[in-house]
Amino acid sequence: MRHRFSLRSNLRGFFQRHPGVAVGLGLAAMTYLTVLSFLRLIQARGTVHGDWGLTVAAGLAASPALIAVAAGVFWWAHRRRADMPQLTIYAAMVFLAIFLLGLGYTRSALAPAIGPPEKVTTPFQLGVIAFMTPVYCGIVALLGWTSVWLVRNRGNAPVASRPAAPGRAARLARPAQRLTGFISPGKRGWAVTWVADGSIPHRASAPTLTATADEATAAAARLYLHQPAITGAELQLAICPGPYRSGPILQVTGEPGAFTATDPRSGKICQGAALEDLIAAHLADGPGGNDFMLHWTRPIAALPLPLTGHPPASAH
């Protein structure tokens, strides 16, 4: 049992160091399935006599139509400012289930584990093979593009595991000049999603807005803790209590216990001891609903120190 775990760990480590090998194996397997699918479609003309052309045409058109419907749902959700990460998870699960069901149903006719492949004799089986063929082609195209990208970017090994060139110091990933966290209501309270041109913290969440902002601040301070000093680095939190479209952006100043939010366009000012108080004050002072944003910007050097007790890197 120990040798089995060791072998599994070694294989996982090998593919992590050489992702191009895994992509190449997947590309070869999917290309093989694609070729077999086309061969079975052609061979089925002699075994499925009734409406062969109509069945193949319907199957080939069904999967692109399904993808088009999914793209339309994503476009609609984006326009409605829906929860895109949650929708992406559901869509991935549905597509994975369809792929596995289609792969399992057509396996006996394409590449059975034992014996020769079965003949395609029913229109339904023929239609499923035709339905899966564009899916295989799309995966082949995606894996082919990934292979080209890995070759062009010398991505056959992750940066962390690739040895530095002689005479050159290894380039360490460093945080960006500006780290942005988008805070919005989540499934269990509030959640922050990071955007930056550099390394970012892990996604954080908490039951309340204040706790989520504190988590985001602590995560940003930890990120810059052992990094080289970055002059003028900033943390900005964009807090959206609802779907944001084109509402006002209130600039937040002050500190916990004495916050002020100012609308630069109208001059409207809201005050409160907590971020929740600013939201409540803005909602109570006029129409517009949740279509607004609180924008809070602070220098990294002014962030509270992490729990480790060490000063942030920008203060070294």
Image (spheres, helix red, strand yellow):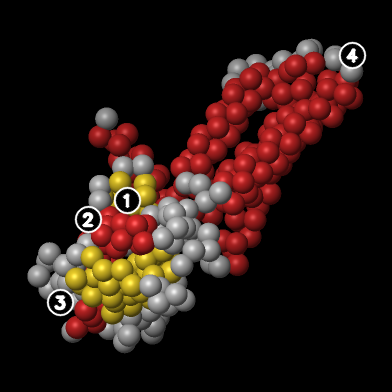
| Real-space CA distance between mark 4 and mark 1, rounded to the nearest whole angstrom | 57 Å
Report whether 223 appears left or right of 57.
left
Q: Position of residue 87 (x, y in %)?
A: 51, 42
Q: Position of residue 120 (x, y in %)?
A: 77, 16
| Real-space CA distance between mark 4 and mark 3, rounded to the nearest whole angstrom | 77 Å
Residues tagged 2 and 1 counted as in contact (Cβ below 8 A): yes
Judge depth for marks 4 and 1 and give the one in front: 1
Q: Position of residue 267 (x, y in %)?
A: 40, 77
Picture quadrant of residue 283 = bottom left
Residue 190's label in the rendered image is 1
| Real-space CA distance between mark 2 and mark 4, rounded to the nearest whole angstrom | 65 Å
Residue 211's label in the rendered image is 2
Q: Residue 91: tell me if it is visible.
A: yes
Question: Dot 4 surroundings within 10 Å: few (below 14), some, or many (20 or more)?
Answer: few
Q: Nearer the viewer, residue 266 or 273?
A: 266
2 or 1: tag closer to the N-terminus? 1
Question: Dot 3 surroundings within 10 Å: few (below 14), some, or many (20 or more)?
Answer: some
Identify residue for label 4: 50
| Real-space CA distance between mark 3 and mark 1, rounded to the nearest whole angstrom | 28 Å
| Real-space CA distance between mark 3 and mark 2, rounded to the nearest whole angstrom | 22 Å
Residue 311's label in the rendered image is 3
Q: Is residue 256 above or below residue 11?
A: below
Q: Is residue 94 above or below residue 82?
A: above
